Image (cartoon, rainbow, N blue to C red):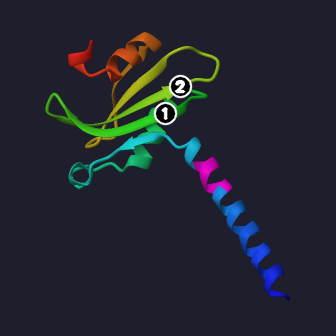
Amino acid sequence: MTLRRTLILALAAGAIATAGFAANQAGAPRRDVPPALAKQAKIGLDAARATALARVPGGEVRSEELEREHGKLIYSFDIAVPGKPGIEEVNVSAISGKVIGKHHESARDEAREETPPHQR
């Protein structure tokens, strides 16, 4: 095989790999799971995600985070349902694995949540 042909094949393989990686990243949910909190969790992220998705049939996770809220260690999932406005927020205990909260957020609620308090 000539050097030129080898170079072309290597570049093509690199381009295909890069395109696949970019496509995968575009659909990945936003994730915020601090390692220090993850060490305290008795339930893993994957199990908590499955529990949350079971509460929102047909939903897709848009963001997932592990946080301490009102003294409790929880996973919080923002789940969108294609064709429906807003998102469902589902909170799962990182200790027991049980759903401890679920509520609907409109697009306006979601935007307000992402705006820093000093800019509201």
In the picture, measured across the screen, residue 75 lies left or right of residue 22, that is: left
Amino acid type, mark 2? Ala
Q: Quadrant of residue 98?
A: top left
- Residue 49 lies within the magenta run: no
Q: Residue at x 58, y 42 (%)?
A: 26
Amino acid type, mark 1? Arg
Q: Quadrant of residue 85?
A: top right
- The label on residue 97 is none
| Residue 47: percent from left, percent from top | 42, 46
- Residue 20 lies within the magenta run: yes
Confirm whether residue 88 shows in the render: yes
Quadrant (top left, top right, bottom left, bottom right) of the N terminus: bottom right
Q: Residue at x 28, y 41 (%)?
A: 96
Q: Residues within 10 Å of mark 1 (few under 14, many from 20)?
A: some
Mark 1 / mark 2, whichever is N-terminal: 1
Callout 2: SS: strand
Quadrant (top left, top right, bottom left, bottom right) of the C terminus: top left
In the picture, measured across the screen, residue 13 lies left or right of residue 73, that is: right
Name the foreground residue: 65 vs 45.
Answer: 65
Q: Residue at x 36, y 50 (%)?
A: 44
Residue designated by label 2? 80
Q: Quadrant of residue 76?
A: top left
Number of numbered labels in the structure image: 2
Confirm whether residue 106 shows in the render: no
Task: Say whether marks 1 and 2 touch (CB < 8 Å).
Answer: yes
Specify start and end residues of the magenta stretch as a single range: 19-24
In the picture, measured across the screen, residue 56 lies left or right of residue 43, that is: right
